[in-house]
Image (cartoon, helix red, strand yellow):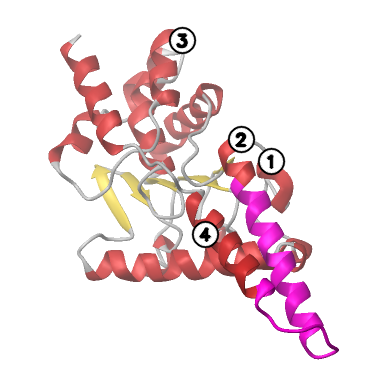
Amino acid sequence: ADQKTADQACLEMGAVHGVHLKYVAASALCSVCAYHAGPDGERIMPLRSLLVYSAATHGLFAGLFVARVGMGILGKQRAAGVVPWWSYLVWAPFHSFTYLYTYFHTLHSEAHGTPVATEVAPGWWIGGRYAHWRMPERRWAATIDLTCEFPEGSIRNTSNYLLTPCWDGVPPTPAQIEEAARLAARACGGGDVMVHCAHGRGRSTTVMLALPRAGSSRKCRGRVPVVSRWCCLGDARVPGPGGALLGLEGRF
């Protein structure tokens, strides 16, 4: 009971909230710029049209984040972790904004002492989108990819790959965590396991915390790490929304 209380307190403390608000802000900014773009004319119309489309795109994705639906709209391939070219074309405002935000956020985090990947237990790693940049030669027994907005950077260096597409700030379902735990348990004997999202804080930490609670078999439960206490030790990384983890308490 004490451990469950501690886990709940940790999850409430570290929940990632309001991720969609940056897209709301981007939509509002594009709308204002389009409104003040000047009088209609041949030169100004393409810019205004682009701004209107950008505002609509950011507004759409903000809605999808809140509703926790539509992860497949970007077309990321489940087997290879590739985002197709048409997605970058159709959803250019979303991709460009997300890439820039994540890149500069990663640089800022590194400058303040937060690494792009952390080994939270022997052989078990939590990382962000750019972890493969810092460890390009490392091979993984398994990679659990929780992003739907980025291509998988270490697909060539992983023996087992699982795509669990989630929006930033939105945790996977208990069933998806169960699938991830089973893959991790099968693969961990062959090397290190990486669980990553965009920043290595919300989605990935939620799954890593949930792994010991998932897995219907004793074999699975015995081979995944128990790292739930780690998140409460003041580390810079924090878990995402706790609903998925607490949902597992009722399943197993």
Q: Alpha-carbon distance for marks 2 and 3? A: 24 Å
Label pair 2/1, CB-CB below 8 angstroms: yes
| Residues at marks 1 and 4 touching, judged by CB atoms closer than 8 Å | no
Does residue 80 appear in the picture of this structure?
no
| Distance from the alpha carbon under mark 3 to that under mark 4 | 38 Å
Decide: is 194 above or below 92: above
Q: Nearer the viewer, mark 1 or mark 4?
A: 4
**Which of the marked residues, 3 or 4, is nearer the chain's N terminus?**
4
Q: Is residue 71 visible?
A: yes
Q: Are marks 2 and 4 in contact (CB under 8 Å)?
A: no
Q: Which residues are magenta?
A: 34-62
Q: Which dot marks residue 25?
A: 4
Q: Residue 251 has which mark?
A: 3
Numbered mark located on residue 70 in the image: 1
- Residue 34, position as x, y percentages in the image: 68, 73
- In the drawing, does residue 42 fall left or right of residue 75? right
- Image location (x, y in percent) of residue 214: 42, 20
